[in-house]
Image: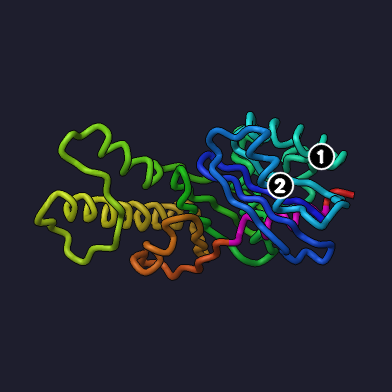
Amino acid sequence: MYILGDIGNSETKIFLVNSNYKILRNINFSSKGINNKILNIKFNSLIKDFKIIKKILFCSVVPKNFYLIKNFLLNKTKNKCYEIKNLNLRSLININVNYKQVGSDRLTNAISLLNRKDNFIILDFGTATTFDVVIKKTYKGGIIAPGIKISLNTLSDKAALIPKIDLKKIKKIIGNDTISAVRSGFFWGYSGLIDNIINLIKKETGKSFKLIITGGFSGLFKDSIKTKVIQDKDITIKGLIKISKLIK
């Protein structure tokens, strides 16, 4: 059995995978306030009935949480826990950016899609809204824009008369009350941001791309983006499965 996980700023997702790379179980929990008590409860539910864990691999953008989980799993399974950047990723993908600064989740997503003939833009609606550009077998870099949920929460926190709002698709551009005005600003504002950045990527590279969208708000925006999109919420675990094959 293998443990594969994605430690994000907002959420941690961990999967139990068998030797045929079939997902058997998964757990999700908040990345805030992780401690050994929480980990013990979560991992007991994940690996119950399975005593032998052969591989443990994470992509992590929260070093403190990875360190805590790594030590917990070392004590629990006696196995070494890898972060993807501990492995020779350049045997899978060419990386044309500052390796230390690019997020492990973004490299994992890029590796998930990698092939020799297609170009991809990966749009991830996470804590930040990120665009990653993959041309053939090369990760070229990307764009980081403010995350939708953080921006929405910040607005309501800083503006006394704006309540907490759930973002929904809205047909009209002109709102007739505070909630519809904010929904319009965020929905159509981010739709415009997305379309503009995609067009600029195409213009700068002179290439065509397949657009893959993932993350929490991907379902909300998939029909508003002018470029044809493919929604894939499992892109990160698919990348982790590919990368895990580097562990002998």
The residue lying at 42 percent from left, 64 percent from top is 219
Q: Which residues are magenta?
A: 234-245
Answer with left or right where residue 230 lies relative to residue 113.
Answer: left
Answer with left or right where residue 186 lies relative to residue 51.
Answer: left
Q: Where residue 216 sits: x, y (%)?
A: 46, 55
Pick whichever, 235 or 39, lies toward us: 39
N-terminal of the two: label 1 or label 2?
2
User: Neighbour class for label 2 at 10 Å: few (<14), some, many (≥20)?
Assistant: some
Q: Where residue 180 sits: x, y (%)?
A: 18, 55
Decide: is 38 above or below 231.
above
Pick whichever, 126 or 190, lies toward us: 126
Decide: is 148 above or below 221.
above
Its colouring scheme is rainbow
Q: The disc labelled 2 sits on which kind of residue?
A: Phe
Residue 76's disc is: 1
Q: The disc labelled 1 sits on which kind of residue?
A: Lys
Q: Give the residue furthest to the left.
A: 176
Decide: is 101 above or below 140.
above
Q: Disc 1, disc 2: CB below 8 Å?
A: yes
Residue 203: image quadrant is: bottom left
Q: Which residue is mark 2?
A: 43
Residues under labels 1 and 2: Cα distance? 9 Å
The residue lying at 61 percent from left, 65 percent from top is 118
